[in-house]
Amino acid sequence: MPWLGIKKLALVPLYRPHAIPPDVIPNNWSNLILERMLFYIDPRYPSYDRSLRAYIHAASSGLADFDCTVLPMQTFDQQNVLPGDLDPILGASLRAQGFDCAALVMLGGVGAGTSAGFWVRFVMAEDTGVWAMEFMHSLTGFADLYPFGGNMDNFDEMDSSNATHPSAYTKRAIKWIDPNTVVQHSQRANDYTLHYIGLKQPPPYGRYAAVQIGTSAPYLMVEARRKVDQWDINIPSEGVIVYRVQTTDPLGHAQNATAPVLRLTPTALLPGQSIVTPENLAVSVTGTATTGYTVLVDNRNLPFVSGQLLVYRDFTRNGTGDVDTPGVIGLGGWQSYTKLWCDGTGAIYAVDTQGRLLFYRDTHRDGTGELVSPAVIGLGGWQNMKFVFSGDPGIIYAVNQQGQLLFNRDNTQNGTGDVDTPSVIGLGGWQQFIHLFYGGNGIIYAVNPQGQLLFYRDRTRNGTGDVDTPSVIGLGGWQQFGQLFSGGNGVIYAVNQQGQLLFYRDNNQDGTGDVDTPSIIGLGGWQSMKFLFNGGVIGNEGIIYAVPA
């Protein structure tokens, strides 16, 4: 049931002549009740109107209002007066007069707030939040959100009764926001701009009150909160909250002894922070907007699409397990680059179709966040290189059209400067290789036309010397692989013709031995990747970046 427009409210002061402790009738009680309803200065908030009307107007964005009448005081000689106890006396008359709800306004201590259909009850000592909650129960039918461990706290009036804004879930249910302003996330990954739910709704064009992930309960809701007004100054934290709706009841009633709504972010997320839920849904706060936050939502249960930048993790790095379920950190267009690689510390380099060298930074390195707005650090000509790949952080190797191995240095590694003026550290013949990639500690692996895996060492790693005289550490067949790259510390990944991801180990890392006998760590589909490259190691986990063609 929506609370839209003007509702007619009756307020009945109730005196109990033998109450324990005694009811003390205040002077001008009717005026005090009207004050609480229409214009109220709470001593705790001396700068604001904390009346019920001010709260309802703000929470509903002006969609809800009321007319109220304080009736003559009633006397009821009973210690515990239930909300409906006066219905036999007044109920029929009040309904006939067109009242939508009637409230018993009592004296005594807090904890009296309750609702029972047409009738509600609260005491003068309870603040605006309790009065609001009970009227909202009666006029909308919306339930309490705190049973069974519900933890929305001050992020929803219907959990805390502290006169904070209801969540987007609650506001949508009682028609205080347009359902169309809650966007349904239906694709693999997309970004959204959220409008603080405490601001006047609807949001400006191109922004949303919330994001819903999933079409039926349980589903997730994502919304932005900030202390934007006198009501939301009491929210626990500012940022983006993620919560799970666990009931199919349209008005929030609990089912199966389960909390109707469960918050998954103990503290609201700020830019640069993210959550991956047990449902394998990732929400990353990527930035701020004038009236909210920008978020990237990634449903990892859905297939990725062409041109997205993906992050996989090899959790074991020992040739066991299955490397799958990537996170999306680039929404599209990454397949347009001619070259793409990482230095192993989160610096991602790309060469665009104009031949410029671009710099991105993956600050999370966990499959969350979003990479946008690269810096240009090489002005042109990089498209002419047959191979380009990182060495140690800041080192970029390239092979030019003459077959020379070049050594470049990104001195800043922060997206500034111009990477130019390479030195030659391989005199020729490097263009012949089928694969060429860095293995860490100065190691450069190569696959020659005969399919052998070769081991080179850049001993100086400063742009001097001549990298030559390789040793053979793989006897043949390496030319068959569609993708071949290192995971560092002797780990070599390969994609075979069946699309499986293979794991090799160069146990010696000194140019001796035979690298053979791989294990399978990716069951299929890896041949569809245009780019596949090492992202370094965090703890014991290997990072692999990929871009589907």
Image: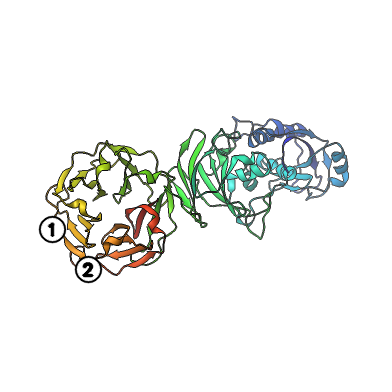
Residue 342 horizontal/vertical position (percent): 31, 49
* Residue 514: mark: 2
Q: Nearer the viewer, residue 119 or 317?
A: 317
The structure residue drawn at horizontal position 34% and vertical position 64%, both measured from the top left corner, is 502
Residue 34 horizontal/vertical position (percent): 74, 32
* Residue 347: mark: none
Q: Quadrant of residue 411?
A: top left
* Residue 469: mark: 1
Quarter in which the N terminus is drawn: top right
Q: Look at label 1 and name its amino acid.
A: Thr
Q: Nearer the viewer, residue 307 or 16?
A: 307
Disc 1 secondary structure class: loop
Q: Quadrant of residue 118?
A: top right
Disc 2 secondary structure class: loop
Residue 368 seen by the camera: no
Q: Are marks 2 and 1 in contact (CB under 8 Å)?
A: no
